[in-house]
Amino acid sequence: MPILEAAPSFDAPFPFLLACHERIRAAFARVVRCAEAHAEVPADTTPAVALRAAQDALAELLPRHAADEERSFFSRAIARDPGHDVRELITQIEREHADIDGHLFALEHWRRDVGTPGDLTERVRALGASLNAHFDLEETELSPKLRALLDREPERSEIGREMAARRGVAWGAQPDWHIRAEIDRDAAANLLRLSQEHMDITARCHVAKKLCKAANAGAPFDAAAARPLLAAIRAEFGRHGALEEADFFPWTLTIGAEASEVSALVAEHETVRPRIDEAIALVGEVARGQGDAGAARQATEWVAREVFNHAVRENRGLFKRAADYFADSDGAPGRPK
């Protein structure tokens, strides 16, 4: 999702207002993608988390945008419109704001009641139809009328100051249009952290592979070295997977990742974790002089191979998708003001 080439600032309130439409369209597109993923795998918690995040972002953007229009633009336009040409149109726009609020409430109601995927699809479509018609009316009919009445000083500065204050931004500051959503900012930090953890985990896998290779070549299996190595892999893989499942994987669904790909990676986590525990137990027995060194070596070899391959699949799949997303966004993730 590319960002605007030249981002409007608060001292250009009309371009800023129209840019908000693009932000809302982008946020709604995320809701659509997440709703589709949720319909595909309705019992999976990962699409559900992603859908909640996308809905929350949209629910934040729309009321703030409506407040800009109603409190900063409409009241001034009515006061400066002696022929009342714009009053009827503003009344219709305000009715549409209430209609859109109703669609947002319907989505929230679906989320609270955990409705069916069919109900979700119907409610998302209804919201989309209302948003499209509403923005078309504002951009083709309302905006030219508002510009004719208000696109001058001191109105521009007054409106810009109010819009800035509504966002908690100091007047004169450039709005951070490169920041699209808090979930993006968190995802960027998570991507860096997870990428570093991949390097740490795969480095340990390389060491474990060397221990097994030496044993395969005839040397005694070094259980004393393998045991803490496996314990470290287990701890890091556990923390790593928990962060992915709770935060990073749901976010990838909002940028177009397939629910089936995410679910497959989660399933791999669930498969690998107990196998690491099994390897640790076998190696521990050998370290105490009681177990089967061959079985311990094979278990260690399996862990090193599968954990490494899992990291490679993530790097080539979801991690690459995330990196490409941020590259297309000029490397600047975050929240739209």
Image (spheres, rainbow, N blue to C red):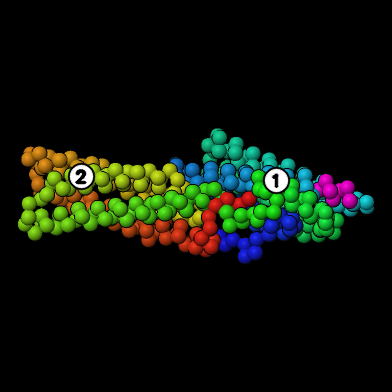
Q: Which residue is identified by label 1? A: 165
Counting from the top left corner in percent of width and height, residue 261 is at: 40, 54
Pointer 1: residues within 10 angstroms few (<14), some, or many (20+)?
few
Counting from the top left corner in percent of width and height, residue 59 is at: 62, 44
In reply to whether residue 216 is colored magenta, the answer given is: no
Counting from the top left corner in percent of width and height, residue 285 is at: 12, 39
Counting from the top left corner in percent of width and height, residue 172 is at: 69, 54
| Count of numbered marks | 2
Q: Residue at x 29, y 43 (%)?
A: 235
**Foreground residue, 56 or 125?**
56
Please indicate whether residue 229 sits to the left or right of residue 218 in the image: right
Please indicate whether residue 148 sits to the left or right of residue 119 in the image: right
- Give the label on residue 228, or none: 2
Q: Mark 1: which secondary structure?
A: helix
Q: Which residues are magenta?
A: 74-80
- Give the label on residue 90, or none: none
Q: Which residue is situated farthest in the right direction here?
A: 83
Magenta: main secondary structure: helix
Q: Residue at x 88, y 47 (%)?
A: 79
Q: Toward which corner of the image does residue 144 lie, by quadrant?
A: bottom right
Q: Mark 2: which secondary structure?
A: helix
Do we see residue 36 in this rendering? no
